[in-house]
Amino acid sequence: MTALTALIRRDIRIALRVGGGALIGVLFFLTVVVLMPFAIGPDLALLARLGPAILWLGALLASLLTLDRLFMADHDDGSLDLIAMSRTPLELSCAAKALAHWIAAGVPLIVATPVLGLLLNLDAGSTLAVALTLLVGTPALTFTGIIGAALAVTLHRGGLLLAVLVLPLSIPVLIFGVAASEAAISGPVSFGTPFSILAALSLVSFVVGPFAAAASLRHGLD
């Protein structure tokens, strides 16, 4: 546990440095949300109706933007080999790195959501509902994304392969995240149903993601 805690703290410090990636994701999220009112126009009712989908899409793209840094820096400086050869199971190390990435890059997106919701004509209750769904759903984006990040770093194909692999796996999270947000605001569907499925997706990704990423790293580093 001490080694995992040290790994989490190290990755968070690296991500929060200038150029570490966390700030890039937040700025990209802000850019997407700010540009949408200009693209849609002055229709406030339409803007409020599309608000949850815009926030979720921005969070998905911002999360994807920073995933390529999850293993790439460690691979370049040799730290990844040391992590793979340590006594700590590689699955737990992958889970720790994914958790650090979510804390550094995902939590700021959730914190910024209530403020950015005002730009989309969402009231306080609606923005809090969207933030709650992001709190439950964004871990699924991260723990699913580590699979693509591990494959990209071992196959040396970079960000393009990462996007191709991760985006299809992220579509169910996006669908149920938007559905839960809209149900909490005004939808005819009960909030509990899509929200429960969203939580289940996060739990499944938390179990499957580290094992799949560790298997990919072992195969690629051999």
Image: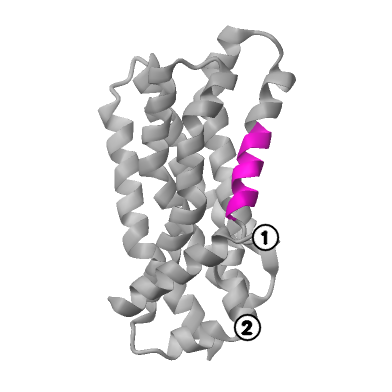
Measured as percent of width and height from the top left, residue 115 is found at: 52, 27
Label 1 SS? loop
Q: Which residues are magenta?
A: 22-32
Residue 92 visible in this rendered orientation of the protein: no
Please tell me whether the stretch drawn in magenta is mainly helix, strand or loop: helix
Q: Residue at x 54, y 83 (%)?
A: 79
Report which quarter residue 173 is drawn in. top left
Q: Which mark is residue 19?
A: 1
Report which quarter residue 180 is drawn in. top left
Q: Which mark is residue 190?
A: none
Q: Which residue bears the numbered disc 2?
A: 77
Measured as percent of width and height from the top left, residue 154 is found at: 60, 78
Measured as percent of width and height from the top left, residue 181 is found at: 41, 27
Where is 208 relative to 198, above or below?
below
Q: Quadrant of the N terminus?
A: bottom left
145 left or right of 76? left
Q: Residue at x 58, y 54 (%)?
A: 22
Q: CA distance from mark 1 to mark 2?
A: 16 Å
